[in-house]
Amino acid sequence: MALDALASADLDHNAPFTEQRRDLAAAFRWAARYNWHEAVANHFSLAVSEDGSQFLCNPCNRHFSLMQASELLLIDANDPKTIEGPNAPEPTTWYLHGALHRRVPHARCAMHVHSKYATVLACLEDSSLPPIDQNSAVFFDRVVIDTDYGGLAFEEEGERCAGLFSDPRKKVMVMGNHGVMVIGETVADTFDRLYHFERAAETYVTALMTGRPLRFLPDTVAESVARGVEDYPVDQPKKHLSELRAILDKEGDDYAA
């Protein structure tokens, strides 16, 4: 679908991605509640075209806690003039997420944050997440570890990071000395993955702080857990986000506006 057609469709309340906008806005609101945001930086995006090149993302310098569905930008990863317009996204949003949506077809949704525990993990000499509990086992052999941080995610850095998501099984990237990038098929899928990765990182970092020896799960058990979650018969990520939206709705939050 062409970008102008998407833009026209978006004026219609019944546009096919109206609920996707609301899902994404709700994810921003909850990310702020969980203190995953970094002032008015960090960024989420969601592909809305079949090839993934046209996507929604947060407007420049808008705080996560104030994000509304109607404010999300609709941009084209293949249009270099996007960064020059009056409604241009924040530069690192454009270069990092634009590269992802151009180069990584399975990255329909992408969430980049500097959440506390994932960022602590990213600062360790060994940034791997060992399987010490059920949450960490979910990510067994499914995390990309980037050890070549090259500065702010402008064009070269954005392209380099996108190139690291070559294995479709690996949907989390620990961005060494930086933060974390999580990708997925939908907002619900990606947000749920980000939530559980941050929880797993918190458990691991806290366990390290005790100074006591850790008990590691066998690789066979960890792999079994990871596959079990991937094949789980209930769509828990979808229900998770649905419940979070229900809480916002009950509180009279204006995220969906």
Image (spheres, rainbow, N blue to C red):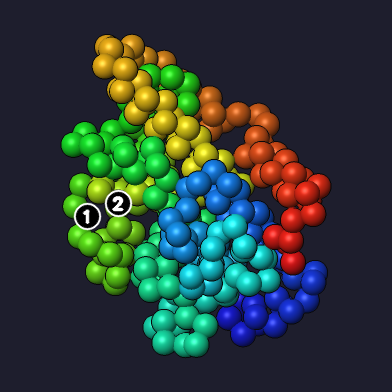
> How far is disc 2 from disc 1 in space, using C-alphas?
7 Å
The residue lying at 75 percent from left, 70 percent from top is 15
Q: Which residue is mark 2?
A: 178
The residue lying at 53 percent from left, 68 percent from top is 62
Q: Position of 34 compared to 5: left or right?
A: left
Residue at the front extreme, as displayed:
39
The residue lying at 58 percent from left, 47 percent from top is 33
Asked which quadrant contains residue 42, the reply is bottom left
Q: Say which element carries label 1.
A: loop
Amino acid at dot 1: Tyr
Amino acid at dot 2: His
For marks 2 and 1 on the same chain, the one whose residue lies earlier in the sequence: 1
Relative height, residue 46 to residue 30 (above, below): below
Q: Residue 73, how many percent across, how many down? A: 57, 74
Q: Say which element carries label 2.
A: loop
Relative height, residue 155 to residue 180 (above, below): below
The residue lying at 26 percent from left, 16 percent from top is 211
| Residue 225 visible in image | yes
Q: Position of 242 compared to 231: left or right?
A: right
Relative height, residue 37 to residue 119 (above, below): below
Q: Quadrant of the C terminus?
A: bottom right
Dot 2 and dot 1 residues touching (CB under 8 Å): yes
Q: Quadrant of the N terminus?
A: bottom right
Q: Residue 25, how many percent across, how many down? A: 63, 59
Q: Which residue is mark 1?
A: 149
Which residue is at the front of the view, 210 or 235? 210
Q: Residue 72, how many percent across, how many down? A: 60, 70
Which residue is at the front of the view, 114 or 233? 114
For residue 11, the mark is: none
| Residue 108 visible in image | no
Q: Residue 168, how many percent across, how many down? A: 41, 46
